Image: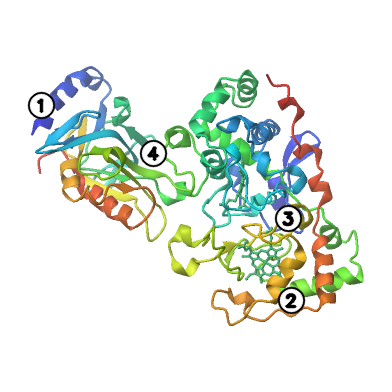
Amino acid sequence: MPLFRRSIIVFSLFAAPLSIHGQGVLEFIPSYQGRELLLDSTYHLGNDSMRFEQLRFYVSGIHFTKEGKTVYQFPKKHYLLDYSDQNSTRIPFDVPMYFDSLHFQLGIDSLTNVSGAFGEDLDPTNGMYWTWQSGYINFKLEGSCSESPARNNQFQFHIGGYQYPYNTLRSISLKASGRERQQVVLDLDRLFQEIELSSEYKVMSPNQAAVRLADLLQKSIVSSEKK
Amino acid sequence: MGVLCLLAFRSSDLILFQRPEHFPAPVYNFEHNQLNQAEVELGRYLFYDPLLSADGQISCASCHSPYNAFAHTDHDLSHGINDEIGSRNAPALFNLAWQSSFMWDGAINHLDMQALAPISHPKEMGEDIRNVVDKLNRERFYKELFYGIYKDSLATGERVLKALSQFQLTLVSADSKYDRVKLGMDTFSLQEENGYRLFLKNCNSCHAEPLFSNYQFKKNGLKADSVLKDYGRMMITQNSADSLVFKTPSLRNLSYTYPYMHDGRFKNLYEVLNHYTSLSVKETKLSEELKQKIVLTNHEKTDLVTFLLTLNDRNFVFNPLNKYPNKLRNKN
């Protein structure tokens, strides 16, 4: 996989901090056409073209387990990953002695959703909070695609909703046998296999379409480790 | 004990927030946003500052005037930026600490998050919270206030929203004649007493005392306006059972908050009472509480209105602490 070639570069970048104090880094890597996604570059698929302009999402409650027992909890409860700011997509952690799985939630839990204003990653100035109806946007992906009939061929997926029946928070558990470097891949090829952009190009509120996309996202998040 | 925990002081001798003796416990979680004088004041400046709008013309108070118990009486529908007309009547703002959902349809689940709606609404303030924060960070007046409170001068979305909540939480209306009667400091006239009895019989199931609302979502039988086509709660839940369901408003301060209902369709309280007495109880679009026909003679209507007027709270409406803060005028 082309991803691995890239991870070598990442490794050398992080080699220095990794060697001290057992610091690790958890990376979330979106992949498209089999390699790491580049925002604002145009991809061609036959006659169609595709471009991603914004990718941001919340990851909450990240922790490692060993045989089902939690061995390490990440320091912050919620992380906003924004692919226009590469630092936000690499999360440092103290490497626990042993762990076999990585767990997290994609999105913001319902209690946080009903508890008022918060700062930092949850600050509404991040543009990840709906204004006309309360609730965090768990996942935002925007771009353009020649297939989309919308203005400027845009597509906009703002996935959120914390209340039944439109709850879009998804739990994810992955095998994690590695040590200092953990990579989670958001496989956009897999995601877009299931999306018909000519008809499904805009999801902007909690509804059935958002729930379907949340389910698809859950399936599109995989570990980079070989099974 | 319970009451003591909720005391917060605006200055050494001024109480910022206190649960009135005859009120239930508030639902706002003060532990997440503890009131203090400086933050309440900051919230008050923000509430009155048109800086929050895109063109610098519209403040929260443009639609929520202190002299109207923070409602708006000139218009049935709200007027915002560029004279844009909204689709709903601006509600009065008081006793917000007892409310768990906001807007006529409950679109907003927490007071802290409410301000995002008018700030971003293209027909209200047409702005973006990020720009608001940037503008605040450029003003010396605010930098000093933020520094005084947080020991760093940075405005953030969280700080702005929580300060707006703090000011609005201090807007407690509990000093009407009704309240004084409840506390044994006054007595109703015979007419008011009779109105109170009629109120308890016909209205209290939804407009429950002492807040004069249970803040639940109900159908009170208003037909949808053919132009506005506002179906209320259904737009939020996408459940057809919630069609024409709206949040029950409080009946305090009605003399200051006309016109009435979510679209301001009734100009006075007699129109409101005529609506309730003319309801057809076979109507499927009515909440349970209204399935018993309301019958009121003209005398009884007068008595009921006389009682409703005992819910006016002049001391709240004319409280100088809630008014436009003069320092704002000289800030630049």
Which is more foreground, mark 3 or mark 4? Answer: 3
Name the residue that disc number 2 marks. Answer: B201
Marks 4 & 1 on one chain = yes
As shown in the figure, which amino acid type bears the numbered disc 3? Tyr
The quadrant in which residue B99 appears is: bottom right
As shown in the figure, which amino acid type bears the numbered disc 1? Arg
Could you give the CA–CA distance between mark 4 and mark 1, rounded to whole angstroms? 30 Å
Which is more foreground, mark 3 or mark 2? Answer: 3
Name the residue that disc number 4 marks. Answer: A78
Could you give the CA–CA distance between mark 2 and mark 4, rounded to whole angstroms? 50 Å
Could you give the CA–CA distance between mark 3 and mark 2, rounded to whole angstroms? 24 Å
Query: Relative to residue B71, is residue A40 drawn left or right?
Result: left
Q: Earlier in the sequence, mark 3 or mark 2?
A: 2
Q: Do the numbered discs 2 and 4 sit on residues whose CB atoms are within 8 Å? A: no
As shown in the figure, which amino acid type bears the numbered disc 4? His
Query: Relative to residue A158, is residue B224 drawn left or right?
Result: right
Name the residue that disc number 1 marks. Answer: A5
Could you give the CA–CA distance between mark 3 and mark 1, rounded to whole angstroms? 69 Å
Q: Earlier in the sequence, mark 4 or mark 1?
A: 1
Q: Position of residue A200 (x, y in %)?
A: 26, 50
